[in-house]
Image (tube, rainbow, N blue to C red):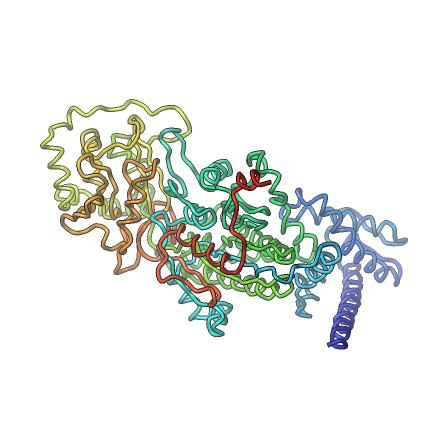
Amino acid sequence: MTTTAPKGRLLRGGRAVARILLVWAAVTGALRLLDVLLPGFRMTHWWQPTVCALLLGLLAGVVWPLVMRIAYPLAFFTFGLFGFLLLGAGTLAVFRTVPGVEVADFRSAVLVTLGMAAVGALISSLLAIDEDEIFFRRAARRRRRHTPAVAADQPPGVVFLQIDGLGFDTVRRAIRDGDMPTFAAWLAEDSHALAQWHTDWSSQTGASVCGILHGSNHDILGFRWYEKDRDHVMACAHPTDAAEIERRHSDGRGLLSGDGASRGNLFSGDADHVSLTMSSIPVLVPKKLLRRRRDRLGAGYYAYFANPVNALRTFAVALTDVFREINAAVRQRRAGVVPRVPRGGWYPLARPGTTVIARDVVVSAILGDMLAGRPVVYADFLGYDEVAHHSGIERFDTLSVLRSIDQQIARLHRASRLAPRRYHVVALSDHGQTQGQAFSQRFGETIEAYVGRLCGGSPSALAGKRRQAESWQINAALAEATKSGGLIARRLRARVEDAECAENRPRTTSGSPGAVTRVAPGVVAVVSGHIAMVSFTEHEGRVELETIEREFPDLLPSLVDHPGVGFLLVRSREFGPVVLGRDGLHRLASGVVIGEDPLLPYGPHAADLIRRVDTFPHCADVMINSRYDPDSDQASPFETHVGSHGGLGGPQQRGFVVHPREFGFPGEVVGAEALHRVFRGWLTDLGHPAPVSPAVSEVVS
């Protein structure tokens, strides 16, 4: 043991020296080649490329990281390109100090800089050297010199890696078909197990992540929802709203409290270390929280882009992803693939933001967290969810993104061996996705326009070519449904006719002023994936079924008969919460079902999940869930997506957890709050201290 370690260090040192010499020689050769090929760049003596290669190596290895500490905010907003401009300026300065080197302009210096970074990336690839491993080995040595040693009795840490939107059914097929070899290896080695969990009715990231990280997702109705008392549409992806949602649900004892880290999430989980997390954008966080969130912007970003090779690699991969997206969209159009959505405009340029840039930065931040010995880390990989929305849940380009995420998880698992403490890696999803043709594509208008029309709003102007080609079939189908209708529609119409209130119902003239769009006077409709929410703004609180029938007699019968609508949730003065479907209703308070149970296709937990949402303070007056077809395993989302989620119906309800087998997993987990309790139990069993509320800790101190 005493001789093996020095020999190992000597061997690694020899490899490092050999690598430095090889890169030096390669850069020297590249400079000679650029001298011949690049106009505006000339070296007049044989020794100049060798000296310049040495000076440029010192610039990239020593000066660049120091400059990036100052300049990383600008690099952040330019995805590392500003850093290359700085390095180009440094390269120009180096050439000006070497006698006889001629550089015509700044552009030539930047091109030389890009060439040097490309050479470094090529050499690293040829040698199969992991740049991250080298960087973080050096970082670990620096930390050991300047920080106390890790206690021997410190419990193992846990890294939670969320693959956004990847359903249980899809991950099983991906493991089987070789698209997720890391997961497949874990299961084959029996180190991990694959489990399923059931989402809430709102099967989307906002409700799921808030429930998982903070233990509560009460009153989160969707990714967007309308709050009547504030006349405001809440959006989980808006920094102000995300901060408000976290304020409502955080008690200071979240899953990541106690020196944990949140990377790339919507909410912080009360972590002390936060970056790329929506609820913790610096200018929007309350002052009392600022002191405990020190690294929200730069963590991972500086560590990654401090290496110019990483910056160039990310830029090149992002550019490749742009062409991959364009190719995939063209192939879908040529093959006539259905369902599909338009994928032009800015989307090809925006897609690498989640599939490449954010992914690489998050991975770098996690590596830093593990080297720092942080007890719990939770990170979100958004790429699969983003591409599945536009391409489909198991199309070839979506699975390509999934394979790249699997590779990153493998890197993190290997890198955990460098950390000062042992780490367990847990992979999970916040929900799945159900595929189908968008509601607006199938029926020629959005659900908001349809609701507005039924409530007396202006006719929709969403005709377009598709509507001109197929509107006669759509209109015929809807007209037939309106004329005859199902059991529940006929009963609703009979109630209205018996009450003889249609001609006397009040009509609003205008909605209250503000940013919220009314689809009809006094009517707001908000969509979130497979859920649409209708609110009547001229009534305070929850509007009852009987009032809706009186004021808008066509609304409920037409909705339940619509072929794109699965069921509605309304509140009856007489029966309490009632779920209405085309051929039956379900009274949630008593459990009485009349006709065919509209919740039957949505699983055994549907009634309980919907009953819970009915108790939410901001539950909409009418909650609409899209129709799910079990035979085709498809549903039509109310947003223009191919793969989508947000409600009940099919794979969107089923998330997954890949966990160390020693942890164990309950037989059935329903809802994100229940999953939070499972994760908290794992941390407790590992020996992590129970979280303490900040108010309690201040009293104790």
Relative vertical location of residue 534 with respect to residue 112 in this rendering, above or below: above
The residue shown at (65%, 58%) is 371
Q: Which of 653 and 377 is in front in this view?
A: 377
**Is 45 located above or below residue 272 in the figure?**
below
At 47% from the left and 36% from the top, the residue drawn is 244
Quadrant for the C terminus, please: top right
Point out residue 472 in the picture as x, y percentages from the top left corner. 22, 45
Asked whether 584 or 684 is in front, the reply is 684
Q: For this rendering, which residue is in front, 104 or 584? A: 584
In the drawing, does residue 572 fall left or right of residue 166?
Answer: left
Residue 440 image point, x, y percent: 32, 45
Q: How many marks?
A: 0
- Can residue 443 be seen in this snapshot? yes
| x then y, percent, for residue 588 | 22, 45
The quadrant of the picture occupied by the N terminus is bottom right
Residue located at (63% from left, 45% from top): 295
Q: In this view, does 201 lie above or below 662?
A: above
Residue depicted at x 21% and y 39%: 576
Most distant residue in the front direction: 700
Image location (x, y in percent) of residue 562: 22, 45
Residue 477 can be seen in this image: no
Residue at the limit of the structure toward the left, as seen here = 498
Left or right position of 686 against 634: right
